[in-house]
Amino acid sequence: MIEVCHLAKRFRLPSRGSKSPAARDPRDHDGWFHAVRDVSFRCAPGEVLGLLGPNGAGKTTTLRMLSSALKPDGGSIHANGIDLLADPLAARQHIGFLSGSTGLYGRLTARENVEYFGRLHGMQPAHLKRRCDELFDLLQMHEFGNKRADQLSTGMKQKCSIARTVVHEPHIVILDEPTTGLDVMSAKILLDFIASYKALRVPLIFSTHHLHEVEKLCDRVCIINHGKTAFHGSMDELRQQGGSADLYDAFVGVIHQGA
Ligand SMILES: Nc1ncnc2c1ncn2[C@@H]1O[C@H](COP(=O)(O)OP(=O)(O)OP(=O)(O)O)[C@@H](O)[C@H]1O
């Protein structure tokens, strides 16, 4: 179980004139930009949680705090009873985090990249080989396993980054826009891969702009708007609060309620 309560993060703004367009954002105060103001949600074992919100809402900033890449200014994050803000090392061990940037080593092959990250997590050679074989099967990566990362297509790089993220069998998986750049077939492989985490009873959180992915996979949804949780609950509750059985209309309804 991962529980996020009242998370907050602000960034120092460069000084600028009062006519700047960014000054109109309600999160802009006294030289600080409050990117995340009050975000709370939870994801239990066996659940997939979808993190939604308009561009700039604060999804990536929130996920970067969960992965310990960014230090929050307020709030708490607990994973399986561990206070991840007090113990960022535990966060790195427990959480597999896919960020927007691939972070692959161009001169290593796809397989070598995944193995390298497994070794960084202290995996023993036989275990690592089994795990890599399993991931290359699940994500259908064998075809390009021996290609250098700098020669991979966008979608191949994305699959490689995902394999790298989960090679050490993390207790919690967090994926920031995982289907970006994937073709229909590759996206299907990835969505099936995400769904498989329910059976493993590993909480999985992913951000996306694709509502059909949310409809297909998610047990729970968190919608962030202007850095605050605008909705957190089940798909049925979202339809109820958004005032429509159609997920797109319900999403728009929730965003308008908070505007
Ligand atoms: N280091 C930073 N310094 C200043 N502002 C930042 C910084 N990082 C993010 N922001 C701002 O915080 C807000 C939230 O950004 P974030 O990347 O979390 O949004 P998002 O919901 O992931 O958006 P998208 O859907 O477009 O990916 C944006 O207005 C962004 O410009």
Image (spheres, rainbow, N blue to C red):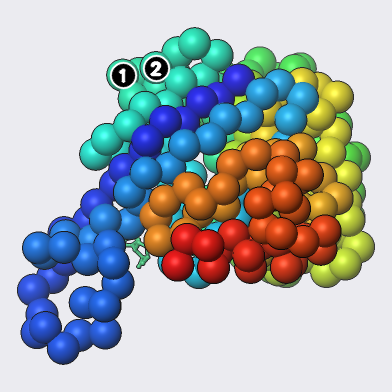
Q: Is residue 151 at least partly visible in the picture?
A: no
Instruction: Please name whichever residue, 203 or 149, is drawn nearer the observer in this view of the structure.
Output: 203
Image point (57%, 30%), residue name: 42
At 85% from the left edge and 33% from the top edge, which residue is drawn? 196
- In this picture, residue 176 sits left or right of residue 4: right
Say left or right for 35 vs 223. left
Give how far apart the Cα atoms at labels 1 and 2 are: 6 Å
Q: Nearer the viewer, residue 59 or 173?
A: 59
x, y percent for residue 199:
86, 24
The answer to whether 173 is drawn above or below residue 44 in the figure is below
* Amino acid type assigned to the residue bearing label 2 in the image: Asp
Could you say which is closer to the camera, residue 23 or residue 15?
A: 23
Residue 76 appears in the rendering: yes
Residue nearer the viewer, 101 or 215: 215
**Whether residue 102 is situated above or below residue 152 in the rendered picture:** above
Q: Which residue is mark 2?
A: 83
Name the amino acid type tagged 1: Ala
Q: Is residue 70 left or right of residue 213?
A: left
- From the top left corner, tell me how far across and down residue 187 is, in percent: 83, 59
Q: For residue 111, what is the image quadrant? A: top right
Do residues under tags 1 and 2 come within 8 Å of each other at their CB atoms? yes
Determine whether 57 is above or below 6 in the image. below
Q: Which quadrant would residue 52 be assigned to in this image?
A: bottom right
Tally of numbered discs: 2
The image position of residue 247, as x and y in percent, is 77, 60
Q: Is residue 215 left or right of 240 when viewed as pictured?
A: right
- Answer with the quarter of the image where residue 83 lies: top left
Q: Which residue is mark 1?
A: 86
Q: Secondary structure at mark 1?
A: loop
